Image (spheres, grey):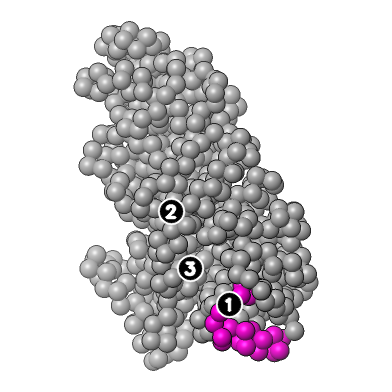
Amino acid sequence: MNARAALTDEERRNLRRNSLALADALTRDKGPEAGLDFLRALFARGIFNSPPISGEAYTAWRRLADAAPRPPVPAAGPRISVIMPVCNPRPEHLRAALDSVLAQTWQDWELCIADDASTREDTRPLLEDYARRDPRLRLVFRAENGHISAACNTALQEAAGDWCALLDQDDLLPPEALAVVAAAVNAHPGAQMFFSDEDQFVERDGRREHLNPLFKPGFDQDLLLCCNCVNHLGVYRTETLRALNGFTPGLEGAQDYDLVLRLLAAYGAEAFVHIPRVLYHWRRHEDSTSADWAAKPYAREAARRARATFAASTGLRATFPVPENSIHAHTRFLPPRRPPLTTVALLADAAPVPALLDRWPEWLERCGLACEVVLVCPAGEREALRPLAERLRARTAVAPSADLFALADKALRVARGDVLCFQRLNDAPLSPDWAAQACGALLRPGVAAVGCRSLSPRGFFRHAGYAVGQQPAPDGDMLPALCPAYQGLHRQSGGYFNWINLPHAAPAVRLDGLCCRRDLLEDCDGFDARAGLWADADFCFAAWSRRGLRSLVLPLDILSAGSTAPVVASTLLRERWGELLAAPPFQNPALAWSPGGWHLRL
């Protein structure tokens, strides 16, 4: 296949729709490698460079991943205790789960099973049969049903391994899962917990179909406050599990989530290591939350209690409203009781729109904080903006040009506040108490900048911070390109796992709606004019690289009639931050952004 041949949109759609059948035909005619080469060529041509990820794209991606050599099995490493609570499983599901452990390429494991007083007559004989076959199975039959937390704690009591991996009775581990974990343990001796990517699967007519891959963004403690974005495969240091007193009875449905939050409170974000590989297959059936969160409504309440306990134990000032149709919390950060002085910098980078100017007193009044206001404009606009400055009791500063970053740099030099919030004068902040929420999110350990989401008048996202995508170079190679994240997605769409509607870390955030500490911005030399349109990303990358401080996107909306930033492989950014663009923080290496959605990359 000629990778440079032009294709029409219809040809692309047909190739995607028929990709697996064509690969199967090539495999039958010319052998397995021919079918795999065909799928590789489709990825190279960008046939799968659009959503959805699930379906043909993920099946093709999995075929190529499965055909790659398995990771080597470490020569030495930890003993891993697999913790499995069991209660009235379907026999075929339990057999599959047990067989997936027996098939592990890493052999230094034990399987600690606590049967929680199952009433099915076939459960005990099945477990005892497997225990006779392999002495690494350790069985405990509880006399009374205590639910999943109690059963997990019983299994934990039996664990003799250095690490504990959690496996549900109807899910599956791929054969290399524990070997990859063992290698990660060897590489990260200070870690307390490892977690991997995962997917779901269904079985139809004797065939297993994998779907809904969850490619996680690394350890994102802000997203974790909203949902259990760690989840499967979770592997914990055994002594740490016991120090935390295991699983909390009464929080069934969110017992894993509660455990992760307590681990974060006790050990900090550095205790977590993400393994960017699909090492867990979550069975989807009518009784599981993988199919429908409403299958376990008690999980909502348990998750709420877990979040409240975390906030109380860490002093976090936040509320966690949960919409009726969701299990995810929409975290609202609260500012400190005595917030530092905040400067709202209004940047006049375009001719003022009178109808918008009249709204700014209202928008500032409801921003949630008592703020200093600085109005920054080119010299030619100063007189026109004088009445607004008087109404807002704002100080006016003149920048040498209407360039947005030149205006922001002038604001930095004249602001008196310790916290700076940048807003374009012709944008409209739609979210109430936007400054208070941004300040509350910012003034926590580890945060460099907080950004908002920008909407077009028709309700489509112009950006929700930055993501990294790919752009073809003249020689045909693909270069990392900085993209406006979620550009083109409608506000009513949840996007990938609804994360756009939740606070989450991102590689970088945009200047319009950006909130940061003045001393950090000064330490990073402000907004470097040499970075051009991407001076805000340059600042965020500098804060991450020099200080390990993350950028955070909040679901606070700004209505903007301005233009949408292009997708560009910036030469300066590649020279300065090539490693970060190649492996962007808080973005899974299997994902790249293109307008309209995430797509898979090999």
**Which residue is at a point 34% across and 17% down the rendered structure image?**
378
Indicate which disc residue 327 carries: 2
Comes first in the chain, label 1 or label 2: 1
Q: Amino acid at mark 2?
A: Ile
Which residue occupies 41% across, 67% down?
291
The reply to whether residue 588 is in sight is no
Residue 133: image quadrant is bottom right
Magenta residues? 115-134
As drawn, the label of residue 199 is: 3
- Residue 131 is marked as none
Mark pair 1, 3: CA separation: 28 Å
Give the residue at the far front of this rendering. Answer: 144
Q: Residue at x 63, y 56 (%)?
A: 248
Query: What residue type is disc 1 on?
Result: Ser
Marks 1 and 2, how far apart in space?
28 Å
Question: Which comes before the other along the chain, label 2 or label 3?
Answer: 3
Q: Which residue is mark 1?
A: 118
- Which secondary structure lies at badge 3? strand
Q: Is residue 352 above or below residue 583?
A: above
Residue furthest bottom as drawn: 29
> Which quadrant holds the N terminus?
bottom left
